[in-house]
Image (tube, rainbow, N blue to C red):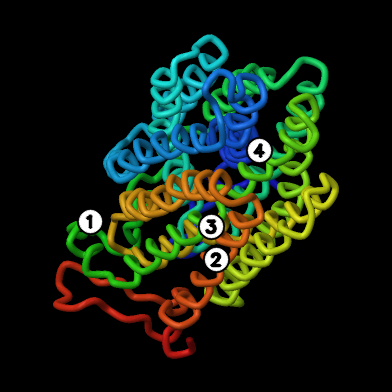
């Protein structure tokens, strides 16, 4: 049965886009999965295993590169979100960002200077700031708020499936051709992601819905940015995202560095690829579950599970440096990060409902998230050099445990949240959901 025309609404806030647009969105999330995160843990493996301490690269140096690039990228997050809120050509922004990330990363094998490495990874981080809010905005503009949670879960499932496939390809080809093969794989995926983006007709994206305005309120205008600053729960959520990534971001990178020392550079890339594939395979059903159940179960209990599993994962790493054990523990990343990835845009949408500031809020929260991720690499690198890998993993686990407690005590259920507007003197509180929490 053919889908109705894109202008058809079953209910306020619910749209029915064409099949081509939805298939294009599926393909975009699949092919963009590896491009949107840049080189990630492969950067550490390449610099440690291929160049090594004799050329000035150790865990602390690599951590510094990743931290600088992360800081530059996080500065770009709010402007990227604001541009997406205002922009009328979101597919073009995604395509331009994909090209920039790919060119920056494929240049790495040809440069030696520390400053050039920092520069290319900083450009990739700035371009990468576009992807999360743009994909969420395009999704909201296509399907509307009523189906947003379910569709975000589907997006994340395709994203994780794409990560698993690309990691499997990277691991298999790196065994025969070396760690640099991941650069060329990324270039191929970037071309395919651009083709997928072109499948989504720009005319089907409702730009007002995409920025979080209520289509049922005719002539509604975006709230001022002060409305976001008055929303104390949005600020708290931003802090919690920073805590989550302060704990999570360095875990896989540290595992990759440990594997490079335990089994050598020839096997480290393939083993990290196995770690990624294992985690991503777990993330697929987790993302689908979050999309299907977030409205029924609420956001808070699911988010608490993400923090709890993250803390457990960090603690379990210390029991052995056996490659099989490390790969098995890394599977827990599929639960924690899988939940976080699917719930993040849903909670931000809850906290900014009707404000018209959905994407700039995503960018602002992602800035806090980026601070945590940027500091994570340096923190873990310093602890590894000064103490041990076990000490670093335990420190990251303790940070996740603190995040669990803060979310449990201070964060409300956001499913029925009423955000503050320009007319509110004080921040609005959650209604039914907060009372239940």
Whichever of callouts 1 and 4 sits on the residue coming sooner in the sequence is 1
Residue designated by label 2: 400
Q: Nearer the viewer, residue 352 or 47?
A: 47
Q: CA distance from mark 2 to mark 1?
A: 35 Å
Crowding near the residue tagged with mark 1, few <14, some 14–19, many ≥20 C-alpha atoms within 10 Å = many
Q: Nearer the viewer, mark 1 or mark 4?
A: 4
Q: Nearer the viewer, mark 2 or mark 4?
A: 4
Q: CA distance from mark 3 to mark 2?
A: 6 Å
Q: Residue furthest front?
A: 386
Q: Secondary structure at mark 4?
A: helix
Q: Nearer the viewer, residue 410 or 271?
A: 271
Q: Are marks 2 and 4 in contact (CB under 8 Å)?
A: no
Where residue 90 sits, quadrant-wise, is top left
Q: Secondary structure at mark 3?
A: helix
Residue designated by label 4: 257
Vertical position of residue 183 compared to residue 45: above or below: above
Q: CA distance from mark 1 to mark 4?
A: 46 Å
Vertical position of residue 277 compared to residue 320: above or below: above
Residue under the point 29% across and 72% down: 232
Residue designated by label 3: 247
Residue under the point 64% across and 50% down: 389
Where residue 230 sits, quadrant-wise, is bottom left
Residue 38: image tag: none
């Amino acid at each position: 049965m053919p889908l109705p025309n894109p202008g058809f609404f079953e209910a306020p806030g619910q749209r029915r886009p064409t099949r081509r647009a939805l298939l294009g969105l599926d393909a975009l999330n699949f092919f963009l999965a590896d491009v949107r995160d840049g080189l990630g843990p492969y950067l550490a493996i390449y610099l440690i295993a291929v160049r090594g301490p004799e050329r000035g690269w150790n865990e602390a140096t690599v951590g510094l590169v990743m931290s600088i690039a992360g800081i530059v990228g996080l500065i770009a997050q709010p402007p990227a979100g604001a541009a997406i809120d205002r922009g009328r050509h979101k597919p073009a922004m995604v395509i331009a960002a994909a090209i920039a990330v790919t060119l920056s990363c494929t240049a790495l094998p040809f440069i030696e200077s520390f400053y050039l490495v920092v520069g290319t990874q900083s450009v990739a981080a700035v371009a990468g700031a576009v992807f999360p809010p743009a994909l969420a905005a395009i999704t909201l503009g296509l399907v509307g708020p009523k189906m947003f949670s379910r569709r975000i879960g589907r997006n994340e499932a395709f994203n994780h499936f794409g990560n698993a496939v690309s990691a499997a390809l990277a691991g298999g080809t790196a065994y025969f051709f070396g760690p640099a093969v991941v650069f060329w794989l990324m270039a191929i995926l970037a071309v395919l992601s651009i083709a997928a983006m072109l499948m989504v007709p720009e005319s089907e994206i409702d730009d007002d819905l995409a920025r979080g305005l209520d289509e049922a309120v005719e002539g509604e205008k975006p709230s001022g940015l002060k409305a976001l600053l008055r929303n104390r729960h949005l600020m708290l959520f931003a802090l919690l995202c920073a805590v989550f990534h302060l704990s999570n971001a360095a875990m896989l990178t540290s595992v990759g560095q440990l594997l490079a020392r335990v089994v050598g550079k020839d096997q480290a890339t393939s083993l990290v690829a196995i770690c990624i594939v294992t985690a991503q395979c777990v993330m697929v059903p987790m993302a689908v579950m979050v999309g299907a159940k977030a409205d029924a179960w609420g956001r808070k209990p699911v988010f608490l599970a993400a923090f709890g599993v993250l803390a457990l994962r960090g603690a379990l790493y210390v029991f052995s440096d056996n490659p099989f054990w490390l790969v098995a523990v890394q599977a827990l990343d599929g639960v924690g990060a899988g939940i976080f990835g699917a719930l993040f845009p849903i909670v931000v949408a809850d906290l900014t409902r009707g404000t018209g500031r959905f994407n700039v809020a995503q960018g602002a929260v992602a800035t806090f998230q980026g601070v945590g991720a940027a500091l994570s690499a340096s923190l873990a690198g310093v602890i590894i050099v000064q103490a041990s890998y076990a000490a670093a993993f335990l420190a990251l686990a303790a940070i996740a445990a603190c995040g669990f407690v803060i979310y449990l005590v201070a964060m409300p259920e956001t499913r029925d949240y009423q955000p503050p507007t320009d007319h509110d003197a004080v921040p609005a509180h959650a209604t039914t959901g907060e009372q239940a929490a």
